[in-house]
Image (tube, rainbow, N blue to C red):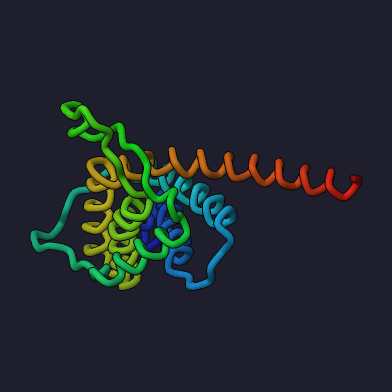
Amino acid sequence: MSETTDHIVYSKNVIDFVTVAVEFCAYLENDDSAERHVWIDKTTKLLSLLYVKALLLPETISLEEEMLETFVKEEDYARIASKVTAIMGEDDVFLEVFVEDMKYSDTPVSAFVSENIADIYQDVRNFISVYQYGLTDRMNDALYACVKNFRTYWGQKLVNVLRPLHTLLFSDATHSEENADLNEEDLWD
């Protein structure tokens, strides 16, 4: 192996994370509209994989002093958030329990699936966009920022948004099974 490919940014765990991250971003960017249950199912699986792969990312140190370029623009973020809002409908909002404000609040704190997913997308998309250039030092700094942001920001958003998606995934499945049973019974009456 050459010295370049021995670098931490080419390690198996990083490449595995990049693979899942690319699939996650591509799925969100895809303009095909999937049925709601299918979208929730795939998104739940992708987010779960993304979380596991992020847990396995190695530690690194930042090599450069300058800020990393951001690739996700405001309109990209808004497009992803709007798409998720349209899919989620009235189920876009959920009660948040793991926020600092909750400790001092007498009223429930709400959050949005669409906003949480767009926040995760923004960090992950910025990360994989750096990888497209193949510049090892920049990739290292992107990895450093991604791990840091996972631990302090989007990792918590990811596990928080899995709660409502999990509930919807299995309540929608139960609801669909009940409807299928009803329709089958109607055929025999």
Horizontal side of residue 168 vs 79, given as left or right: right
Quadrant containing the C terminus is: top right
In the rendered image of this protein, does residue 107 appear above or below residue 161? above
Query: Could you tell me residue 145's position as x and y percent?
Result: 22, 53
Q: Residue furthest front?
A: 189
Query: Could you tell me residue 8's position as x and y percent?
Result: 32, 52
Image point (33%, 50%), residue name: 116
Query: Could you tell me residue 77's position as x and y percent?
Result: 29, 65
In the rendered image of this protein, does residue 56 appear above or below residue 76? above
Query: Could you tell me residue 21's position as x and y percent?
Result: 41, 57
Image point (42%, 59%), residue name: 84
Quadrant containing the N terminus is: bottom left
Q: Quadrant of residue 56?
A: top left
Q: Tell which of 11 and 34 is nearer to you.
A: 34
Q: Residue furthest left?
A: 65
Q: Residue furthest right?
A: 188
In the rendered image of this protein, does residue 102 appear above or below residue 19? above
Q: Quadrant of residue 36?
A: bottom right
Q: Tell which of 125 and 37 is nearer to you.
A: 37
Q: Is residue 22 visible?
A: no
Report how many numbered discs are placed on residues in the image: 0
Image point (84%, 43%), residue name: 185
Q: Tell which of 45 and 170 is nearer to you.
A: 170
Image point (54%, 57%), residue name: 39
Q: Quadrant of residue 156?
A: top left
